[in-house]
Image: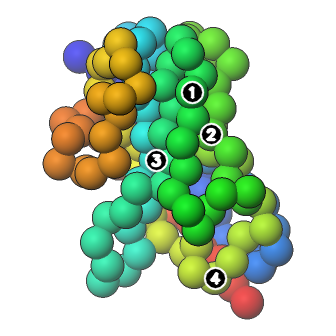
Amino acid sequence: QVHLVESGGGSVQAGGALRLSCAATGYIYSNYCVVWFRQALGKEREWVATIKTNDNVTNYFGSVKGRFTISQDNAKKPVYLQINSLKPEDTAMYYCAARPSFSVTQCYTVPEDYSTWGRGTQVTVSS
C-alpha cells in the first residue's frame, strides 16, 4: 500500500519561496498521476498542479502558472512543488495525492478521484 508524506511547508513573507516534497513509501512513482491540492481555511480543496510520472507531463491551475513548478527527478524520488513569489492567498494546507495511471488523460483534478493522500503540510504567507 502506498503512503504519501508531505513536507517543506512553513511560514514565509510574501515574495518568498518554498519547496514542498511528496514522498511515497511502500511503492515507487512508476506510472502515476501525482497531484497537489490545497485547502485554505473555510474553503474547498482545490487542485494546484499535476505530474504524470514516467512521462513528466505537467499541468497547472491557472492562477499558479509561472510561480509553481511540479517536478520529479526519477520514479524513486519524491515529487516536488516549488513555489515562488508567494502571496498571502497561497496560505493553505497543501496535500499531495496519487493514483496509478498509464495516461495523463486520467490525471483528474477533483479530489474525489484520489484515494491515496498525505496528511498535508501547512504553508502560511504573511504580507
Where is residue 6? Give x, y as percent. Answer: 49, 42
Q: Residue furthest front?
A: 105
CA–CA distance in space, label 3 to label 4: 18 Å
Label whose residue precedes the other's in the sequence (3 or 4) = 3
**Residue 39 or 109: which is nearer the viewer?**
109
**Residue 125: x and y, percent?**
66, 77
Decide which of tag 3 and tag 2 comes sooner along the chain. Answer: 3
Q: Alpha carbon of mark 4 to alpha carbon of mark 1: how far?
A: 28 Å
* Marks 2 and 4 in Cβ contact (< 8 Å): no
Amino acid under disc 2: Ile
For residue 57, which numbered disc appears in the image? 1
Q: Which mark is residue 88?
A: 4
Q: Secondary structure at mark 3?
A: strand
Give the number of the mark in front: 2 or 1. Answer: 1
Looking at numbered disc 1 in the image, what kind of residue is underneath it? Val
Look at 48% across and 70% down and name the residue there.
Answer: 92
CA gap, disc 2 and disc 4: 20 Å
Q: Nearer the viewer, mark 4 or mark 1?
A: 1
Q: Which residue is mark 3?
A: 36
Circle 3 Cα neighbour tier, 10 Å, few/some/many (<14 / 14–19 / ≥20): many
Give me the residue at 40% from left, 56% from top.
Answer: 47
